[in-house]
Image: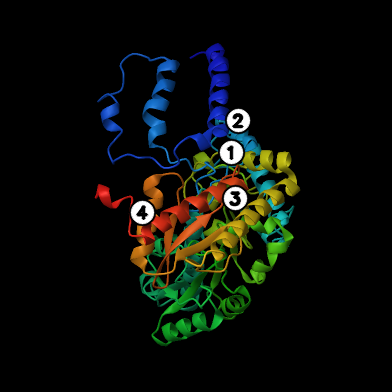
């Protein structure tokens, strides 16, 4: 493909993508396939001779699209949103074209400097304390990670390194292995599994503390766990608080947890992967009260802020907590400006060395939507969630299982877990909408999340009518899936 072909095919691809997005609700949201469907549809080996663009695109529809779960369909109400917008897609195209590997400032100065500025812009948009911003001479700053899971791992490893250095200085007779064996980190029983996984990778104990009746972590539970562990000779060093948990969008109580972490000198990380985007709206920032106690803060613009995956933003109050934990400087990565104090080398802030020019997506989206446009997007989704909540509350067969704060509604049929499992199976078997469940205490609960940028009231109304029709069939003794079992 030469430049002339690229111009032609590029325009065709833009048209294909635009058509896909505009007509996505005509596609079945959830695929009807068995595992292994794709291999028999492709040759055993790659072609020896070039094939045409037309042939490849025909196979996109024949092979790929039947196996796609359409996350951006207005009938997709599962997991959490996956960000997407036309400005972000255009920026991704430019990112691919520039194709820099921005591991250091000198590898592509714009890649580094735009990211630093965009993280400051976003930090100001959600009213993060200024200690988290880089500015011209701040000690903090932000970085784009791939996912919130990576962010949690990075800060846990940084916290581990920091406490190891402190304790070895204070107790030189202790080996690193002896200290590691005593370290313990905490999260609530509602935290994302990636926090526990970070502990596994980091080689430290992780314990969960029980959440309260609203599924939030509270100070007394953390203090009790820490006192018990200290009495047993363990060393608390890290706590991950969640703002907007995955099961129910619950918010841990930072005003209780923060002072304890400060008093005990343990690293407080805040995971706001989904809910953090809502903080661009002033009316939701009360959920952030206590953020000033945190050492690090993370959320995913690629969930709810119209920025395509991957773009997970992480801020730290002291950048040296990250960079000193992971800094290596082989000769081939050194450059004349690295000791000037004026630049950032983001390779010291992340697990991989290489990195894409991801801040372009933020720059395009922030400029072409503006803060007001982003606020309206969030508020619209929350209005739609409230609409669905009202529909559920009006039907005496159903119950709301957790407080509705943002765009997630947790609901279920009154009755057994088996009844609700059957309802979920019937919903996803018909493939008109797609939702996923969660477990809240001992109850099996259905999650309904407003996800797509294009979701409107009539999509919510359709989803509720569909759910209630299937519920009626089930309660009357029928099941659309039983005949296929």
Residue at 72% x, 38% y: name it. 368
In the structure shown, which secondary structural element does the residue marked by tag 4 occupy? helix
Instruction: Give the alpha-carbon distance from disc 2 to disc 3, as whole Å.
Output: 22 Å
Q: Find disc 3 in the rendering and name its residue.
A: 304
Q: Would residue 97 appear left or right of 189 to someone viewing this image?
A: right
Q: Would residue 450 appear left or right of 430 to someone viewing this image?
A: right
Figure coloring: rainbow
Q: For the residues labelled 4 and 3, say whether their Cβ atoms are less than 8 Å apart.
A: no
Above or below, 446 relative to 351? below
Q: Would residue 370 appear left or right of 110 to someone viewing this image?
A: right
Residue at 73% x, 61% y: name it. 282
Q: Position of residue 443 (x, y in %)?
A: 40, 70
State which mark lies toward you, 2 or 3: 3
Residue at 60% x, 30% y: name it. 94
Q: Find disc 1 in the rendering and name its residue.
A: 357
Q: Find disc 2 in the rendering and name its residue.
A: 94
Question: Which label was assigned to residue 425?
Answer: 4
Is residue 147 something one can see in this rendering? no
423 or 364, nearer to the observer: 423
Residue 132 lies in what quarter of the image?
A: bottom right
């Amino acid at each position: 493909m030469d430049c002339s072909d690229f111009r032609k095919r590029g325009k065709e691809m833009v048209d294909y993508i635009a058509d896909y997005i505009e007509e996505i609700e005509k596609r079945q949201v959830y695929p009807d396939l068995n595992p292994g469907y794709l291999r028999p549809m492709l040759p055993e080996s790659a072609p020896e001779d070039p094939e045409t663009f037309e042939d490849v695109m025909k196979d996109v529809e024949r092979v790929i699209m039947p196996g796609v779960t359409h996350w951006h369909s207005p009938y997709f109400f599962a997991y959490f949103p996956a960000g997407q917008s036309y400005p972000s897609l255009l920026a991704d195209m430019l990112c691919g074209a520039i194709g820099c590997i921005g591991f250091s400032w000198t590898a592509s100065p714009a890649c580094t400097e735009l990211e630093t500025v965009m993280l400051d812009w976003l930090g100001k948009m959600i009213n993060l304390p200024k200690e988290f911003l880089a500015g011209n001479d701040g000690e903090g700053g932000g970085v784009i990670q791939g996912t919130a899971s990576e962010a949690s791992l990075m800060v846990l490893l940084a916290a581990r390194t920091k406490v190891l250095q402190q304790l070895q200085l204070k107790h030189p007779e202790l080996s690193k292995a002896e200290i590691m064996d005593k370290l313990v980190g905490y999260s609530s029983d509602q935290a994302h599994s990636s926090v526990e996984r970070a502990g596994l990778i980091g080689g430290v104990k992780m314990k969960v503390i029980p959440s309260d009746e609203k599924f939030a972590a509270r100070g007394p539970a953390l203090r009790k766990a820490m006192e018990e562990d200290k009495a047993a000779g363990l060393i608390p060093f890290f706590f991950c608080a969640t703002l907007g948990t995955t099961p129910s969008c619950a918010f841990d109580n930072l005003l209780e947890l923060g002072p304890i972490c400060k008093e005990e000198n343990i690293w407080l990380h805040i995971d706001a992967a989904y809910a953090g985007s809502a903080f661009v709206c002033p009316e939701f920032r009360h959920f952030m009260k206590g953020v000033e106690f945190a050492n690090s803060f993370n959320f995913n613009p690629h969930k709810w802020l119209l920025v395509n995956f991957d773009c997970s933003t992480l801020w730290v109050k002291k950048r040296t907590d990250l960079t000193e934990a992971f800094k290596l400087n082989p000769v081939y990565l050194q450059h004349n400006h690295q000791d000037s104090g004026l630049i950032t080398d983001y390779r010291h802030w992340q697990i991989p060395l290489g990195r894409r020019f991801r801040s372009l997506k933020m720059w395009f989206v922030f400029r072409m939507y503006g803060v007001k446009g982003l606020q309206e997007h969030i508020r619209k989704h929350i209005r739609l969630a409230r609409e669905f909540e009202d529909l559920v509350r009006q039907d005496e067969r159903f119950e709301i299982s957790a407080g509705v704060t943002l765009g997630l509604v947790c609901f279920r049929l009154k009755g057994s877990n088996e009844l609700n499992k059957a309802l979920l199976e019937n919903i996803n078997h018909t493939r008109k909408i797609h939702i996923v469940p969660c477990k809240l205490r001992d109850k099996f609960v259905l999650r309904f999340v407003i996800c797509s940028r294009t979701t409107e009231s009539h999509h919510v109304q359709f989803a509720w009518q569909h759910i209630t029709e299937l519920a009626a069939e089930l309660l009357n003794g029928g099941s659309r899936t039983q005949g296929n079992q």
